[in-house]
Image (spheres, rainbow, N blue to C red):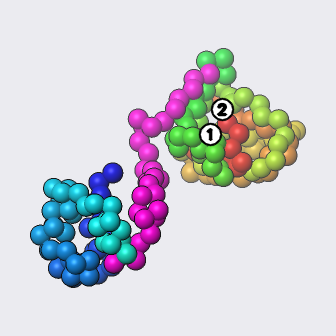
Amino acid sequence: MEIGSKLKRLRVLAGLTQEELADRAELSKGFISQMENDITSPSIATLLDILQCLGVEIKDFFDEETETQVVFTEEDYFIKEDKELNNTIKWIIPNAQKNMMEPILQIIEPGGQTYPDNPHDGEEFGYILSGTVEIHRGNDVYLAKKGEAFYFTSDKKHYISSKRGARLIWVSTPPNF
């Protein structure tokens, strides 16, 4: 843990200069500067005094916040090829199965289809990036082409096929891919 940079961030958030914090904590401005640059480390008593001046509890100071990843690249994707059904699934958000929804990039080769999914609680949404797909839901079949979207509840057996191939973003909630 970089104590110095965290203390500096808290000081700036509190709207204090190094000199103002030093005065409140009865320390020198030079010590605050060295501490913020990780040149020196404060004793526990000094750290407690500084945190009190900043209005921060020690337990909150040492709680590690994990940053949530917002942008994902191809290096993050998990890919599954199904040669039997002629399709590829790219999980474009890693570990999305623990989220409320699970988006995938579905690539269906000519004559391919997705694995038939039995009825379950939830909803399905898709946006066709290229090609044309047939959405099979129960006994019904719906066509959707590039630039079109689909949406349905997952209460009937369903799958997607494509005679000439297609690429689509498919989002399921709750996650089930």
The quadrant of the image that shows the C terminus is top right
- The reply to whether discs 2 and 1 touch (Cβ–Cβ < 8 Å) is yes
Q: Is residue 173 visible?
A: yes
Does 1 sit above or below residue 48? above
Query: Which amino acid type is shown beneath numbered disc 1?
Result: Thr
Measured as percent of width and height from the top left, residue 175 is found at 68, 44
Residue extending furthest front? 45
Does 38 sit above or below residue 74? below
Give the side of residue 173 with respect to residue 58, left or right: right
Give the side of residue 106 with respect to residue 118, left or right: left
Q: Secondary structure at mark 2?
A: strand
Q: Secondary structure at mark 1?
A: strand
Q: Which residue is mark 2?
A: 162
| Part of the protein shown in magenta | 53-82
Query: Which amino acid type is shown beneath numbered disc 2?
Result: Ser
Measured as percent of width and height from the top left, residue 51 is found at 35, 71
Q: Earlier in the sequence, mark 2 or mark 1?
A: 1
Does the segment drawn in magenta span residue 54?
A: yes
Q: Which residue is mark 1?
A: 132
Residue extending furthest right? 139
